[in-house]
Amino acid sequence: MLIFRQLFDPQSSTYTYLLGDPKTRKAVLIDTVFEQARRDLALIEELELELLATIETHVHADHVTGAWLLKQAVGSRILLSKAGNAEGVDTALEDGDAVDFGSRHLIARATPGHTDSCMSFVLDDRSMAFTGDTLLIRGCGRTDFQQGDAGELYRSIHEKIFTLPGDCMVYPGHDYRGLTSTSVDEERRHNPRLGGEIQEADFVGYMDNLNLPHPKQIAIAVPANLKCGRREDGIAPDEAPSWAPLAYTFAGIWEVQPQWVEENANAVQMIDVREADEFTGPLGHVDGSSLIPLGELEANAEALSKDRPIVAICRSGARSAQATLMLRKAGFEDIANMAGGMLRWRSQRLPVVGGQE
């Protein structure tokens, strides 16, 4: 079995792919997005994986890669085609190179045409191919900038992708209609630009007349990606909040551990969002916490101060996680969920008001 997750960035419609070896817990990420680096790290941590490398299918023009950010966070290596000539690449890939992660590996296939740095990556058993912008679902990457060449793209797809087994699943770098995957056989037969009896001259004529506007972020994305997403000042932006040792979950929630809350109770507002009978029930409650049931939180949010951090508490951490989202929408910034709720608090034998042993 392969650990596999397909992740999505809604702003750029980019797919990021996580592949992991369940035996060794080694993993790689394909086509990370700068703004989603924290999300990706949270998933990797929750799945107990070690990120060995980030892999770029090409030098992107529509988003900035998160490769540099991830390297700063966990030491992952940055892999990109040698033809990309990017600064900061740890391994410059060439056609046929293997990318190992534990007992599994990907094979790099040079597939230029959209850009000269384009590569597709085929899983060792040829059951999956990650084609970046080279081959999309019923489409393909454009060829009107960044060393694009329609004839070269046609040959790359027909020689390097369409020669894979028909049932090989194809995972593209983008999709703008909500589609997630296709297969080699489907695209060989049904791709309106490349499939069936379409010849190279037909394809070139089609691509030369697309007349598309350039990507909105191209002026920012290309220079940044030629440095693997590294900022000019070398500083990683959007640092984690500093008021507490917070952990970010894949669900998008900032969490703090009960032990820290107990030691810093005077520095935060503790909001218990259970019902009144739970607040005084068998689990008891944290001394100094205020009861505001979740159903009443929105109406009472204005009673809370925005000058002191807020820790939301419930029985297990589920309702309080929702409370943090509600309060964030209401304009509160320094807010965290108490991980595990009162169940974890009691399991760690921290002091409570009321409750039963």
Image: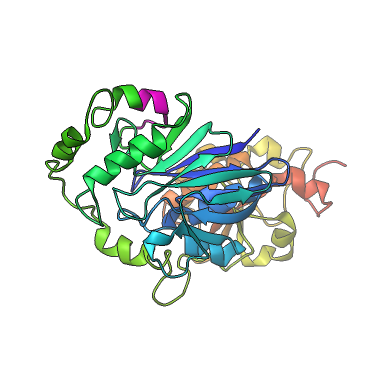
Does 307 appear in magenta? no
Residue 251 visible in the shown view: no
Q: Quadrant of the N terminus?
A: top right
Give the side of residue 205 with respect to residue 29, left or right: left
Instruction: State the residue in front, 334 or 269.
Output: 334
* Residue 294 horizontal side relative to residue 15, left or right: right
Q: Quadrant of residue 5?
A: top right
Identified at 42% across, 58% down, the residue is 65
Q: Position of residue 260 (x, y in %)?
A: 71, 61
Foreground: 225 or 193?
193
Can you tell which quarter of the image residue 10 is in? top left
Q: x and y percent of residue 22 in the render?
A: 69, 40
Residue extending furthest toward the bottom: 233
- The residues colored magenta run 178-187
Q: Residue 176's x, y, as percent?
A: 30, 37
**Above or below, comparing residue 187 to residue 131 in the picture:** above
User: Number of labelled discs?
Assistant: 0
